[in-house]
Amino acid sequence: VWSDMRDPAGSETLETVAGPGRHATLSPMRGDEALAQAARNDHAAFLALYDRYAVRVGRYVTAHIANPSDAEDVVSLVFMRVLERIHQYRPERGSFAAWLFGIARNTVREHYRKGWRFVPLLASHRADIGPSAEDTVLHRDALDAVGLAVQHLTSTQRDALALRFVAGLTYAEAGRLMGKNEDACRKLVGRTIESLRLVMDEEDER
Amino acid sequence: MSNDPNTSGDSAVIDRYLETVRDVDTQRLARLREQLAATPHPHRRRRRFTIALPSATIPALVTAIALIVGSVALIQHSRNRASAGHPGTAADGGTILFVRQNHWYTMAPNGTHLHMLLSSTADCSDFGCAFFSPDGTRIMVAAHPADRIRVATAIIRTNGSGYHVLPLPDSRLNLGPGAWAPSGSRIALAGWDDSNKSRAGLYVVNSSDGKGLVRLTTSPDGRHDDPLLYSPDGSRLLFYHEGTQGSSGGPGFGGLFETTAAGSGRVKLNPPGTYVTADFGSPASWSPDGKHIAFTAFDDTRAGVSAVFVENANGSNRHRITPWGEWSTSARWSPDGSRIVFDRLAMNGYHNLFVVHPDGTGLKAITSNAQRGLGACCSVWSPTGYKLLTSLVPVTGTGHLVTMNADGSHLETLPVSRTNNDNWEYAWGR
């Protein structure tokens, strides 16, 4: 989806973002901050930002909320809030992406706060996994192991991974949203990856 | 935002992790884009305050009411409206105020006498936007002034009459709700000027005409001060100081402060290393004698980990009265002073209500909705303190506003449906 989109200014191809089977190549996309400034009064600029970020925000939300319907509702709420608050964005205080995912993060937390149900992540992932060719089965087993491990991460660990690798924020930006400094965030992510690696290694040894 | 798989091994783990993350349905994203494209641009509307219009301007009254009540309740409502234009007094007395789909309603505590009071043009998910006067006869709400851009405060009687927007003192200041002084004659408001951050602070005006403006606080960092509650004797005022996350767009995480009614002193109440949120109504409440304050605060270093604290009205002798737990956001002192009701997230994602004595003894869960698939949140006391009003919402579909005894017994469902998309704005006035 993303590779087919063009920057509204027509000058650049938008970055490909995280998708199944690949991790994010989230180099900064030029013009987000300028677009956000324009979006204070220009609806077209806001929609251009939506085009740039909708998929990524969707993936960030589904990293936390497995129920597809709930996740879609939360994504809607995120962008309604972005529209409502776009005039509050200040480029001098950070990237638009960090501001946007701050809203997304808080909306997800509010979703939990309102008593919505935590649906086990694996339940939906299994449904998305393909037919039963042997290699697919093997892959599914590994995915289940990692998925199960992800499910058992603390909310802080899961959030750190999502902000860093799904949202594509820098360690400093992710840390700021989580109330941590850059180094602490980097260590948190490192430890989390290590814990997932152990799960994968154990699976490989079976 | 460079990607940073530290090693090839890390990259493989991250790949696997990302495989566990789904995409949102593209057709749904396309539909959302269409909805956003059709949504009027808000320009410089401030986020926190809902904008209220008198119900007389809303032609779809019957439709709106039908959205929130069942057919039986609607019949009851029609019968009652024929005989009375305002909420009656029943059960535990007083009037219940609640918001549903951007409309404000009042009803009697037994579920009768439903009346649409106001209609809003904006969601009110972030902050309490309507407040009963101490005697329960008036309600303070956010409103637009004549310029239709800034935020002002309006007063309306509980029976729906007398709506008027309090005038703003100049062409730039916003003054949004709000806390009532115990006398009901003065109200504390959140003030700010989009062109001049130094004007952010608490202001006080007459509730009758908006005159007699006095500035109470000066925000040291230009972020907003939002009034929460006056002490019972009116000598002190609790307020919330917006945090950095709030000003950068997310729901607010800031600090709980108090000042005197004259604005002298600025005492921070939540402990170092904690923050508070006012996104679900006031996180704090006064003891009925005004000598103590109960509040919830979150640990800075542990996401969502929070507890209930009690301290003296002057900020001294602070102590935590509950164990640390997940997502406690409201601590409300009972009118008789013997208990504090608070909410807490259970392991399965649902909230339950608890009561505890102010000294931390007698901690007891009064709902067990985790077993019933319901979520309880943000309970408020009836004026007598015998009952609690809260919202119970199931996993999917709709739940209801409910009342219950303070020990959780005698749960009664009000004919007001709630979904997870509704906010938590409700109050029980005298």
Image (cartoon, coloured by chain):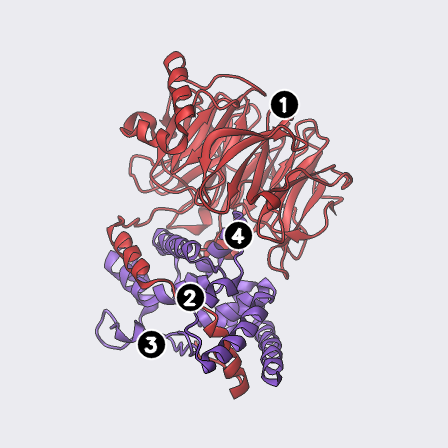
Chain colours: A purple, B red
Q: Provide residue B274's location: percent of width, then percent of height.
A: 64, 54
> To which chain does the residue with label 2 belong?
A
Q: Marks 2 and 4: in contact by CB < 8 Å?
A: no
Distance in Å between CA atoms under marks 4 and 1 = 34 Å
Task: Quote the CA–CA distance across marks 4 and 2.
Answer: 18 Å
- Amino acid on which the number 2 mark rests in the picture: Arg
Q: Which residue is mark 2?
A: A59
Disc 1 crowd, CA 10 A, few/some/many (<14, 14-19, 20+) = some
Which residue corresponds to mark 1? B384
Q: Which label sits in the foreground, 3 or 4?
A: 4
Which residue is tagged 4?
Answer: A117
Q: Nearer the viewer, residue B29 or B160?
A: B29
Q: Which is more toward the observer, A40 or A50?
A: A50
* Residue at 46% from the left image edge and 57% from the top image edge: A67
Q: Earlier in the sequence, mark 2 or mark 3?
A: 3
Q: CA distance from mark 1 to mark 2?
A: 48 Å
Disc 4 crowd rating (10 Å Cα; few below 14, some 14-19, many 20+) is many
Label 3: how many Cα within 10 Å (few below 14, some 14–19, many 20+):
some
Q: Which x, y percent locates residue A200? A: 58, 80
Q: Position of residue A18 (x, y in %)?
A: 40, 74
Give, as a three-letter code, the residue at label 4. Answer: Arg
